[in-house]
Image (cartoon, rainbow, N blue to C red):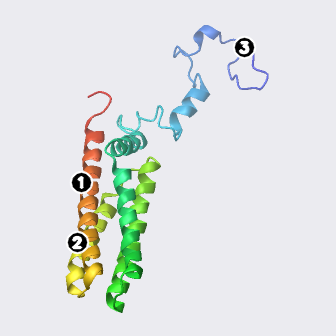
Amino acid sequence: MSDPNGDDRRTSDESEADVGTGTNDGPTNRREEAAADIDSGTGIGDGERSGGRDHRNESMQVANEERRRKTPVISLLVAVLGAWVALSVFVFQTDPAPLWNNVLVGLVVLVAAGYNYYRVTNDVPLSTGIASLIAVLGVWLIVSAALLEMAGGLFWSTLATGLLIAGLAGYNAYEGREARTVATETGPGA
């Protein structure tokens, strides 16, 4: 039987029993040969070229492990705390230096933690570098409360929020690293 589209490249003297047996000099099935050279983007069948490991699937495993460990919830909580730091200067009266410190640090924490939340909820692993940066900013909030001589409620608010941000972001960075380790060490054959 011949293909009317011309995809069948066998000559009339070749029998269908010869196809795929290696008796022909040329390729027996051009579609399969071409498909073997194409990266499908889905990760299915691509493991042969990458040493048996599919890095896209590995990334999704890391993100799933991070979701199981509740890192998106912690990232969202840290983002809310960052928003509180930025807005707390409007609740408590303060000088310009603490005002700008809290607004800028709070906005950076809000954006960075929101970015990590976005990553994990979209099957992209949490950025441990960003989470570590947020933890450092939390430590800065603790130090800046005394260094900038914040007074009254703003001092205690900045101190407590800095402790929470440093602790939660540090924990998030640790859990993100552990999730990556667990997901990459245990594979389908392990």
Density class for disc 3 (Cα within 10 Å; few <14, some 14-19, many ≥20) is few
Q: Position of residue 162 (x, y in %)?
A: 26, 70
Residue pictured at 30% horizontal, 67% vertical: 133
Q: Nearer the viewer, residue 135 or 79?
A: 79
Question: Mark 3: which amino acid?
Answer: Ser
Q: Which residue is mark 3?
A: 12
Question: Mark 1: which amino acid?
Answer: Tyr
Query: Relative to 171, is 94 on the left or the right?
Result: right
Question: Mark 2: which amino acid?
Answer: Val
Q: Earlier in the sequence, mark 2 or mark 1?
A: 2
Q: Answer above or below: position of 52 versus 137.
A: above
Total numbered labels: 3
Q: Which mark is residue 174?
A: 1
Q: Earlier in the sequence, mark 3 or mark 2?
A: 3
Q: Residue furthest right?
A: 4
Q: Earlier in the sequence, mark 1 or mark 3?
A: 3
Please identify the quadrant where the C terminus is shown.
top left
Rendered image quadrant of residue 3? top right
Rendered image quadrant of residue 160? bottom left
Residue pictured at 70% horizontal, 22% vertical: 8
Q: Which residue is mark 2?
A: 139
Query: Relative to 22, is 66 on the left or the right?
Result: left
Name the front one of labels 1 and 3: 1
Density class for disc 2 (Cα within 10 Å; few <14, some 14-19, many ≥20) is some
Q: Answer above or below: position of 189 versus 149.
A: above
Q: How much space separates mark 1 and mark 3, taking CA atoms?
A: 66 Å
